[in-house]
Amino acid sequence: MTHIDHRRRIATVPALLLGLGCLSTVPPALTAQAFTGPGRFSLTLGVAAVLPADVRFVNGEDAGEVALYGDDEFDTGALGAGPEYSFAAGYRFGAFRAQVELEITGRFAYEGQSNYPSGGAVQPTEADLKARRLMLSGFYGFGTLTGLHPWVGAGMGANRYHLTDYIQRFPNPDDPSGHLRRGPGGEVPYTSLPPGTGPGFAWMLAAGLTVPLGAAALLDFGYRYTDTGHIGTAIGDIEVVRYNEDGGRRLLQIAINQTIADLRLHSLTATLRWLP
């Protein structure tokens, strides 16, 4: 996934919002039931454009194994942009709406740099991340603003992530003939970290506008900030691939502690809310 691809994905969101904004011309009489009167159930389908996020991997808690990073060592980079899909069921109490949300991400590509001594100025790293979140959220709607309905929201719940294919490469070490030398065919030495999966506490804040489509359907557009808690690799063996002076390939397996990173996401959301 390239940075150009990220920009193209993100650029489609404002165009989508502009194109759908014309739907706010629905007469107020048709939408009164959606915002006033007795409480109503709602079902929601949504999509979000998650913006690139800064990530920094460091040592986790000591579990009795080797720490991957030494003092002032880490792996820092960015999680690329990608889609997120959501499904929700809720109930409105006057201006307040509560709902249970299930959020599922697409595959996010992580690209970063480690900074081991003697590893050289360029130490590229990569990994893949997927996640699911179950959230209990609340939203408060305000009065109309030129036919639109502004709202704010907050929520909390649980995030479960899957971090895979985590590799650190060393193409240009400080000493090309040293322990990070290339293989006889130009093979680059690398370290492969164990995959990680686990739960974590998550919370979010949101704000946006609702575009009425009639008495039984609404479009919600918004911005959402989500703190997903920690992600990271599991306690387990790293695979260290190096090459001897005679060109022979060496594979070492070393048990390490967990590595972790905080993950905070910014996203632009578009959801269709149906009022049965």
Image (cartoon, rainbow, N blue to C red):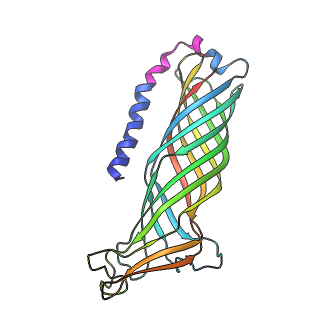
Image x and y of residue 171, in percent: 32, 74
Can you say which quadrant of the picture contains the C terminus? top right
Image x and y of residue 92, in percent: 70, 27
Q: Was residue 35 drawn as part of the magenta stretch in this picture?
A: no
Q: Residue at x 50, y 65 (%)?
A: 56
Q: Was residue 28 drawn as part of the magenta stretch in this picture?
A: yes
Work out whether residue 251 can be spotted.
yes
Q: 131 left or right of 203? A: left
Vertical order, 99 against 20 (above or below): below
Vertical order, 179 against 69 (above or below): below
Most distant residue in the left direction: 185
Looking at this view, is 182 or 38 the one in front? 182
Looking at this view, is 253 or 274 the one in front? 253
Vertical order, 190 against 175 (above or below): above
How many numbered circles does the render carry?
A: 0
Looking at this view, is 152 or 175 the one in front? 175
Q: Residue at x 27, y 75 (%)?
A: 186
Q: Residue at x 62, y 28 (%)?
A: 43
Most distant residue in the front direction: 248
Vertical order, 44 against 262 (above or below): above
Residue 118 occupies quadrant: bottom left
Image x and y of residue 63, in percent: 65, 75
Work out whether residue 261 can be spotted.
no
Residue 257 occupies quadrant: bottom right
- How would you classify the magenta stretch by its main secondary structure? helix
Image x and y of residue 189, in percent: 37, 76
Instruction: Report the span colored magenta.
Output: 21-31
